[in-house]
Image (tube, grey):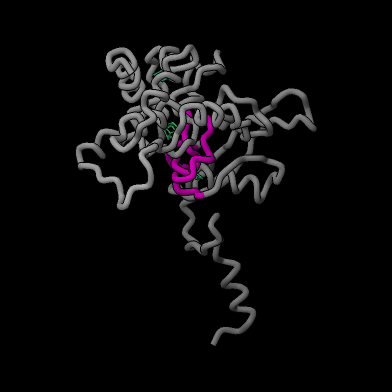
Amino acid sequence: MSTAAEVLQGSDDRQVGPSGSQVAPTDQRMALTLKIRRYNPEVSPDPWWDEFQVKMEPTDRLLDALHEVKWRQDGTLALRRSCAHGVCGSDAMLINGRNALACKVLVQDVAPKATVEPIRGLTVLKDLIVDMEPFFEGYKSVLPFLVNDSGEPDKERLQSPEERERYDDTTKCILCAACTTSCPIFWGDDEYVGPAAIVNAHRFIFDSRDQGGRERLKILSEKTGVFRCRTTFNCTDACPRGIQVTKAIQEVKRSILFDRF
Ligand code: SF4
Ligand code: F3S
Ligand code: FES
């Protein structure tokens, strides 16, 4: 049986991973420098850059590295996250100049250095946290819910596999805002509803059970709608769910032009 001293000695040799799990002593961790754009109006009216050094497992996520900074080096660092698995959409940020979810970027893909900034086109509140209200206003403006006034059905509204397939891609949106905040039109024009709102309108416009398509198309034909898009494709490149955002926008444009809603 081990003595208390041996148990303590043994525990000293082990390391604790970012998730709290114990990891083997063989150290394959990588050095990573995080250069983070900071902003705190209570400290300075201007943003500034801070650098932090961390050692992480190659397969840790950039979100783990940000936790390492926040939990062990600087508790004032502000960021949003929840699921840590690419589902909730709350940790979109600019990583080495490209919009991405911090929980889906591996440390080994960015080491030895990663630059982290808040997403663009929305007001920064603190560090990596932006005001998402204008984004959600655009989303809400396109009626992103099923509209059907034919009364309560006795059973579920049936749909063929082909009808379901028609809007399958746009059901995958997690409202992370990576698309909208990578769009140069949105950066210069906060009236534009932005690609995420159009994706969520598309999801219902092409749903055979929905009756609100005409109203949505009317909203999106206005000057704040789809015709602001200049087919730049940044949105498609940025989408962490692989949604064909620009294609969805084109389909909505075509519907407005040719379906005579
Ligand atoms: Fe995020 Fe993609 Fe939805 Fe845009 S379309 S909000 S990038 S999941
Ligand atoms: Fe913007 Fe995407 Fe159109 S980046 S211009 S919404 S194709
Ligand atoms: Fe939920 Fe990254 S923390 S998507």
Residue 17 vs 187, above or below: the answer is below
Along the viewing direction, whichever of 120 and 15 lies nearer the viewer: 120
47 horizontally vs 116: left or right: right
Residue 230 in sight in this render: yes
**Is residue 108 within the magenta segment?**
yes
Number of marks in the image? 0
Q: Quadrant of the C terminus?
A: top left
Residue 242 shows up from this direction? no
Q: Extreme bottom residue here? A: 1
Quadrant assignment, res 34: top right
What residue do we see at 59% from left, 47% from top? 67
Tell me where residue 253 sits by quadrant: top left
Q: Is residue 65 magenta?
A: no
x and y percentages locating residue 88 in the rendered image: 49, 44
Of the pair 17 and 42, the residue shown nearer to us: 42
Rendered residue at 60%/48% (across/down): 68
Nearer to me, 2 or 164: 164
**Stretch of the chain drawn in magenta:** 83-111
The extreme front residue here reads 151
Estimate the x, y position of residue 192 in percent, counting from the top left: 51, 17
Q: Looking at the picture, tell me which residue is in the foreground, 202 or 71.
A: 202
Q: Residue at x 54, y 65 (%)?
A: 14
Left or right: residue 229 compared with residue 22: left
The quadrant in which residue 38 appears is: top right
x and y percent of residue 116 in the render?
56, 32
Quarter of the image that includes the N terminus: bottom right
Q: Position of residue 77 (x, y in %)?
A: 67, 40
Q: Compared with residue 252, is residue 139 higher up or lower down, i.e. above or below?
A: below
Task: Determine the residue positioned at 56% across, 28% down.
Answer: 137
195 versus 163 height, above or below: above
